[in-house]
Image (cartoon, rainbow, N blue to C red):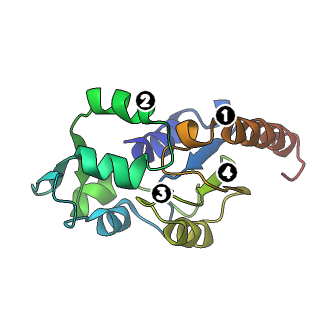
Amino acid sequence: MVVMVFPLAWKGFQKRSLGGVFASAFMVGPNFTLEDTNKILLRPDQADDSFVIGDPVRIVLFGPHFAATLLYQNSPLEDLKLASYSIRLTQFFRGDLANKQIRVTKERYGSVPRAYVVDLEDKAITPDVQRAMIKSTPPQVVREIEGADHMVQFSKPQEFANNLIEIAESFELFGQGGRP
């Protein structure tokens, strides 16, 4: 789960990280915890999904209807088809274990520049939720992509690539003492 990878990587390789880009992703911070993401992720209305609830670990298998209607609704059909071949269990931590897995402190938070790309047609992590995370844990750079679903790299690849280039350039400026 990428939400867990960034903070752990930054903790160990802070001086080697130019920055991090979140696109339709949970951006944890001192004011938005991993446990908060679990509250948003509950989707019992999706009948083709298998939720294997455990405590403190929850295992989820997203089904084809969930993928087609909430993740890939604007993406090419071939990308949805390819994704269906690589469906795997996803693990989410709950409660105290979630907070122990990713501990973000106010003292070190923000030591690596962050950018957030809001995908304006994401139905899995809605733009309202994305903006709430941005408000509670503000990144240095915010971009929006019109028509992008949850899988922005498939639904709007050129726009996403252009934004990544601009963000990388702003991170280089930020690293030299400038402001993105």
Marks 4 and 3 sit apart, C-alpha to C-alpha, by 17 Å
Q: Which of disc 2 and disc 4 is earlier in sequence?
A: 2
Position of residue 156 measured from the top left corner of the image (x, y, whole percent): 62, 42
Q: Quadrant of the N terminus?
A: top left
Question: Which residue corresponds to the image point at 25% horizontal and 64% vertical from the top-left?
Answer: 43
Q: Is residue 57 left or right of residue 31?
A: left
Q: Nearer the viewer, mark 3 or mark 2?
A: 2
Q: Nearer the viewer, mark 4 or mark 3?
A: 4
What number is the disc on residue 104? 3
The residue indicated by pointer 1 is 15
Question: Which residue corresponds to the image point at 44% horizontal and 50% vertical from the top-left?
Answer: 73
The residue indicated by pointer 4 is 115
Q: Pointer 4 and pointer 2: residues touching (CB < 8 Å)? A: no
Q: What is the three-letter code of the residue carrying label 1?
A: Lys
Q: Which of disc 1 and disc 2 is earlier in sequence?
A: 1
Residue 123 occupies which quadrant of the picture?
bottom left
Q: Is residue 90 left or right of residue 18?
A: left
The residue indicated by pointer 2 is 78
Question: Which residue corresponds to the image point at 25% horizontal and 42% vertical from the top-left?
Answer: 90
Marks 3 and 2 sit apart, C-alpha to C-alpha, by 38 Å
Under tag 4, what secondary structure? Answer: strand
Q: What is the three-letter code of the residue carrying label 3?
A: Val
Under tag 3, what secondary structure? Answer: loop
Q: Pointer 4 and pointer 3: residues touching (CB < 8 Å)? A: no
Marks 4 and 1 sit apart, C-alpha to C-alpha, by 17 Å
Q: Nearer the viewer, mark 2 or mark 1?
A: 2
Q: Which of disc 3 and disc 4 is earlier in sequence?
A: 3
Question: Which residue corresponds to the image point at 32% horizontal and 59% vertical from the top-left?
Answer: 99
Position of residue 7 measured from the top left corner of the image (x, y, whole percent): 49, 46
Q: Pointer 2 and pointer 1: residues touching (CB < 8 Å)? A: no
| Residue 102 visible from this viewpoint | no
Q: Nearer the viewer, residue 22 or 44?
A: 44
